[in-house]
Image: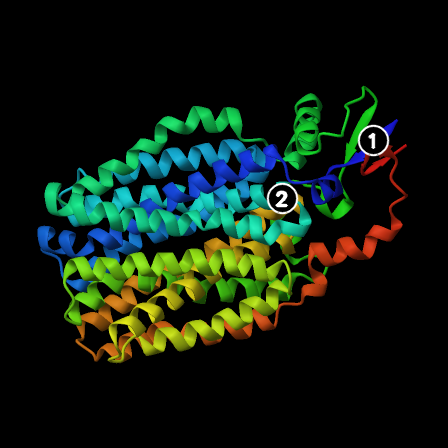
Amino acid sequence: MRQVDVHKLADEARFNGFHRLVLFWCALIIVFDGYDLAVAGIALPSIMKDMGVNSTSAGFMVSSALFGMMVGAIFLGTIADRIGRRRAIAICVGLFSVFTAAAGFTSDPVTFSVTRFLAGLGIGGVMPNVVAQMTEYSPKRIRSTMVTLMFSGYAVGGMLAAVLGKGLIETYGWQSVFVAAGLPAILIPLIMKSLPESMPFLIKSGRIDELKQTVAKLEPSYRPQANDRFALPSEHKADDAPIRHLFHEGRGFSTVMFWIAFFMCLFMVYALSSWLTKLMANAGYSLGSALTFVLVLNFGAIAGAVGGGWLADRFHIKHVLVVFFALAAVSISMLGYKVPTAVLYFLVGMAGATTIGTQILAYAYVGQFYPMAVRSTGIGWASGVGRSGAILAPIVIGTLVGMNLPLQQNFFAIAVPAVIALAAIALVDHRRSATAHDGDVSAEIPEPVAIGTRPAILRQ
């Protein structure tokens, strides 16, 4: 009997077409997700004018989607470890596509908020699942780069919303940018056909033939045999209570620190995503110029995510996060001051790199911290708890905007959470992570036998 350790096989695989396919689908899904999330902030001034709502009410309208994201991240992140990650991702795409489009047909704040809540279930639920998917199938040596490159699609989606928003809103009204979000629903059959299922789920479900096909694509030198048996290290095996594993093996304190960091980082991300356009308009910039700042914010996010991933594969990802949070505090604080236009664009780009980009990097860190079988659960709970910060941000900043405070105080309120997040990440005990534990137990695994010209993680 030949035993195959799929966890280590995925870690040591060479990057190939299979990895490109997983990256393509996960990144494309995140582009759609980012568009659906950013579209409300882009259209907010027009929605407020059309529906006759004030800034406080508008903050609650935006937060309805974020509340849905909190529920979706926890529920659909956790359930994916039970029903399969591919099916959970398809459900999420259907939810955020259909109900974001439906929001474009509403005419009052309550109905708009209900449809945005339902869309938020999918927007929030898809994030932990695609991060877990990309983490599981990425070679270990480039894992952070792969996850952050995939998640940079979030910023691409935000940029797409801003570009389309400039033309569509002025020509066809704010409703048009929402209706356009329904198109990704037609891709669901392709997603179900092309995206691989999670390997621990296939093992748990006894779908060994499908698993063999997936492993052969992941590592082309693998040749399936009838007596192959597939295994995971004990800490990577799923059971019926995945949540408790977030607090096992000394991970409890670090789990709470991740939740605090996510809360604070998502507060900053959604404060900027929801109110940057309005704050810049209040500062005297035209709608077109204010939307340009959104483009710069998301361009910075792409640079921060990809650059942060590259740094994290060369230095410790925890240390990179600490530095990024420090830069976020400085750059956001300075946005409220009168500076030359070129400097202002640089600061907005830096804010995007160190908030949206840092959040993407934080997803990568959490994905590496937890064992494979509860990875979606770990990411889902961190994201879900963090969503409470995202929910509060539009309301809190909307209230501050309504108080007509100086611009500096608005941006200072957005910057303070960066300092708290920095402290939380600094306190994470990386020695309790799954990756650190893998290093500890690797010496206990017998020497692998060879398949073809590549070493395979196999035991006789």
In the image, farthest residue toward the top: 226
The answer to whether 314 is drawn above or below residue 457 in the figure is below
Q: Is there any visible trace of residue 241 in the rendered image?
A: no
- Relative to the observer, which residue lies in front, 47 or 23? 23
Q: Nearer the viewer, mark 1 or mark 2?
A: 1
The answer to whether 22 is drawn above or below residue 347 in the figure is above
Residue at the location (33% across, 42% down)?
A: 119
**Upstream in sequence: badge 1 or badge 2:** 2
Q: Which residue is mark 2?
A: 138
Task: State which quadrant residue 205 falls in.
Answer: top right
Could you tell me the amino acid type at mark 1?
Answer: Ile
Residue at the location (71% across, 33% down)?
A: 219
Looking at the rendered image, the quarter that the C terminus falls into is: top right
| Circle 1 SS class | strand
As measured in the structure, the alpha-carbon distance from the residue carrying label 1 to the one carrying label 2 is: 20 Å
| Circle 2 SS class | loop
Q: Is there any visible trace of residue 336 in the rendered image?
A: yes
- Relative to the observer, which residue lies in front, 17 or 151? 17
Could you tell me the amino acid type at mark 2?
Answer: Ser
Left or right: 444 in relation to 82: right
The answer to whether 59 is drawn above or below residue 205 in the figure is below
Instruction: Give percent across and percent down for residue 260.
Output: 50, 66
Left or right: 402 in relation to 247: left
